[in-house]
Amino acid sequence: MSEALLRVRLRPTMLSDLDFVHQVEVDSHNLPFITPWERTQHEGAVRFPDFRHFIVECGEHFASAGFVILQGCRSPHRSVELKRIVLQPKGLGYGRACVRLLKRIAFRDLHAHRFWLDVKSLNRRALALYASEGFVEEGRLRESVRVSSDLADGYDTLVVMSMLDREYEARVALGDEDG
């Protein structure tokens, strides 16, 4: 995994990156799994200190490949949310490398006690990734998000998953993290 981590880095999103963020967000491969934000929401996340909004850069030349948003970075409860992760290249290991970087940021830099996320149940690939990276399912918010596309119109369930600081440290001790 170390080699993949060398090919993935995060840099703070600039306002000049928001056209790229929008493009990735509305890409037909990503749209079924997220609810796109308005530009003003992304501007707020770039500016507001409780958020960390990053551009994901991947590959040999660190080309922009997506973005991530962390929320709750100043939470008095030390509960940081992985609000959004959206990548364009699929199946190359960048998602896993990115999740590992985000865990390190959450637990080492932001001193989170709890790092959590929610993911649509139809996003099987992401569910499997998060489980394999040590996130534990906490519960389900049944039919809580509207899904509307050319193929379907209905509702999907959100799966809430989290990792605690002691679980992360145990993974580091076992060599399951690059911590």
Image (spheres, rainbow, N blue to C red):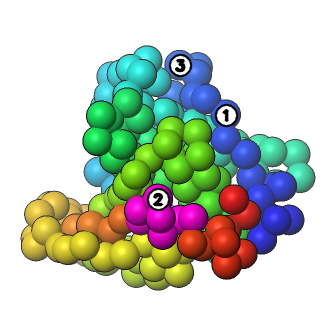
Residue 119 tag number: none
Tag count = 3
Report the mark closest to the observer, 2 or 3. 2
Label 3 is placed on what type of residue?
Leu
Magenta: main secondary structure: helix
Does the magenta segment cover residue 164? Answer: yes
First reached walking from the N terminus: tag 2 or tag 3: 3
Q: On the rendered structure, is 17 left or right of 166?
A: right
Q: Secondary structure at mark 3?
A: helix
Taking the magenta stretch, the answer to whether it contains residue 121 is no
Find disc 2 in the rendering and name its residue: 165
Task: Classify residue 133 as left or right of residue 48.
Answer: right
Q: Which residue corresponds to mark 1? A: 11
Q: Is residue 82 above or below residue 157?
A: above
Residue 156 x, y percent position in the rendering: 18, 71
Sequence-first tag of 2 and 1: 1
Rate crowding at label 2 as few (under 14), some (14 to 19) or many (20 or more) other CA atoms within 10 Å.
Answer: some
Secondary structure of the residue carrying tag 2 is: helix
Q: Position of residue 115 (x, y in %)?
A: 41, 55
Q: Which residues are magenta?
A: 163-169
| Disc 2/disc 1 C-alpha distance (Å) | 24 Å
Please tell me which residue lies in front, 151 or 176: 176
> Residue 99 placed where, x, y %?
57, 60
Q: From mark 2 to mark 3, how far is it between C-alphas?
A: 32 Å
Quadrant where the N terminus is found in the figure: bottom right
Image quarter in which the C terminus is found = bottom right
Residue at 30%, 62% in the rendered image? 118
Q: In front of the other: label 2 or label 1? A: 2
